Amino acid sequence: MKLIFELDKPGRRGFSYGANDVSATNPLPKKYCRLNQAQLPCLSELDVVRHFTNLSRLNFSVDTNFYPLGSCTMKYNPKFTEAIAALEGFTQLHPLLPQLSSKLAQGSLEVLYEFEQLLKEITGMSAFTLQPLAGAHGELTGVMLIAAYHKNRGSRRKYVVVPDSSHGTNPSSAAIAGYQVKVIPTGADGYMDLEQYKKQLDNEVAAVMLTCPDTLGLFNPRIKEIADLAHNVGALMYYDGANLNAMLGKARPGDLGFDLMHINLHKTFGTPHGGGGPGAGPVGVNEKLVEFLPISRVIRKEDAVFALEYNYPKSIGYVAPFYGNFGVILKAYAYILALGKDGLTRVAEVAVLNANYCQSRLKEYYDLAFDKTCMHECVFSASRQVKHGVHALDIAKYLIDQGYHPPTIYFPLIVQEALMIEPTETESKESLDAFIEIMIKIAGLAEENPALVTRAPLNMPVKRLDEVRAARQPDLCWKKS
Amino acid sequence: MNIPNNIFYTKDHEWARIEGKLAYVGISDYAAHSLGDITFVELPKIGQMLKQSAFCATVESVKAASDVYAPLSGKVVGVNAQLAANPELINQSPYEKGYFFSMEFSDEAEKNNLMDASAYQKYVEGIAK
């Protein structure tokens, strides 16, 4: 397929401007004018529509394909939430309006306020900020809250502890916020090595960040003990909520001993994963940390009027303009209200059931990282297939050819040739069975005719890419030849 | 798996080859093989002080980015400038052309924390199980 710039036909137009009715006596100052013409391609409206429609047909999405991308919770995004987010009363509001007159934005402020109440109920936290624009942004906000908490107590702490089965964003958020990271290895039982953990804990540790259930899809049965040990040295417990889907309605991070957490609305609460955005990563905290939350915060006054409040002198300030990705928050709010408490509990039950179904049907054909009941995802290793020259990457490419988005591969890092499968609750038994059959077929091909797998994909518009060359000699800018 | 005899190894798969006061540092064949095709390396700066087992470099492959830890304490005195343009040297020649940097090590006794080739061989075989 050609790039849109290659379709350029100088002189072709898709839009005609009306006559300029602004006086030209006050032209823009030179310094604001571009030096060269914008190099936009000249195309008709139909050219553009066809280009992007055809591009979208090459894409894999939850609406078109099963998408078991582990750790990403690629559940179906129900369409009614789009309709609600498109209501004019929301879309036509200027984001500054609540600051100028909260009276004129009561509906939107109520959504923010009520959504925070729901998240508190679901997680057992005391308060939330809805500002962070993605999960990693939420994590960074969380680590900044941790730093503010210790600073306020006059405590200088240098380290953040993470297990090696954590999400990569955990150590990176800690490092960006200025902490040094201590990594705890996973023990032979698949859980964080508790003895190593105890050795690393001291009064220089600011926080322990846990992904729970972890990236092996396992729920650590010793959370309480881990939390108590951290609290004994004055450290805070951070809950990475990326895998919250597995626990909805079953257990609340606040009750398990966590002090703060983030939620990925685009995972757990059914809002779309865009191409890098927009997501939303609200951060919840218990009483220890409420005073440090970002401003502004939405409050409900005694007369049931909603307003923005700024008077929190110990706040870490703004972490995003305005109130977060409002449209995403609105969709997640609608999703939670539609499912209700029983529906959310059922989400967790079916998500875990589906993952265990995949695990138990495939474990005869692929090596399990740890043979235990899993939570929302199961992690295999392609080590048995590698003996025949078929790697996790080859399996992923073959799945693409069969119309499946591949599982996450080569993550978690502690599992060689990892294949991380998260089916989510929205897939039917039929779609799981069809996927499982293909996976079984690949395991057979790996032994009998590995070349069929290692050459894949053969039916896609783009065949096997040279990933090494793409990484070593990236060519990212199109230039007119 | 290539595990030469004359050098020392860490549990994190770095190696150190001692030549007089200098130690040459890189990652083992096993590490390079596990990472797959290496695409990028971030090396320490010349003059930088390193602490044994502390972070000193980053290596990226098509599969993952990994931290590299210093096998010994001391001062970086040279870096392998070839790696910037040719990171594949690490896959092709992990113990020679694909070395990361050289350092003046400060404590001879730290060698006792490292493995020799036969101990490392056993260690790697243990992981493979």
Image (cartoon, coloured by chain):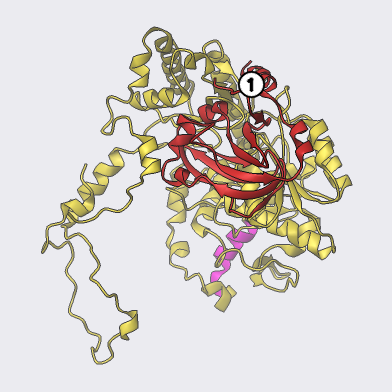
Which chain is painted in red? B
- Colour assigned to chain A in the rendering is yellow
Residue tagged by mark 1? B124
Instruction: Out of B116 and A410, give the one closest to the viewer.
Output: B116
Identify whether B56 is placed above or below A222: below
Mostly what secondary structure, the magenta segment? helix
Instruction: Out of B7 and A317, give the one closest to the viewer.
Output: B7
Which of the chains bears the disc numbered 1?
A: B
Image quadrant assignment for residue A106: bottom right
Q: At 84% across and 37% down in the image, what residue appears?
A: A198
Please state if A174 lies on the left or on the right of A389 as rendered. right
Quarter in which the N terminus of chain B is drawn: top right
Magenta extent: A104-114
Q: At 27% across and 87% down in the image, what residue appears?
A: A27
Q: Decide: few, some or many residues near mark 1? Use Cα within 10 Å; few <14, some 14-19, many ≥20.
A: some
Please state if A365 lies on the left or on the right of A258 as rendered. left
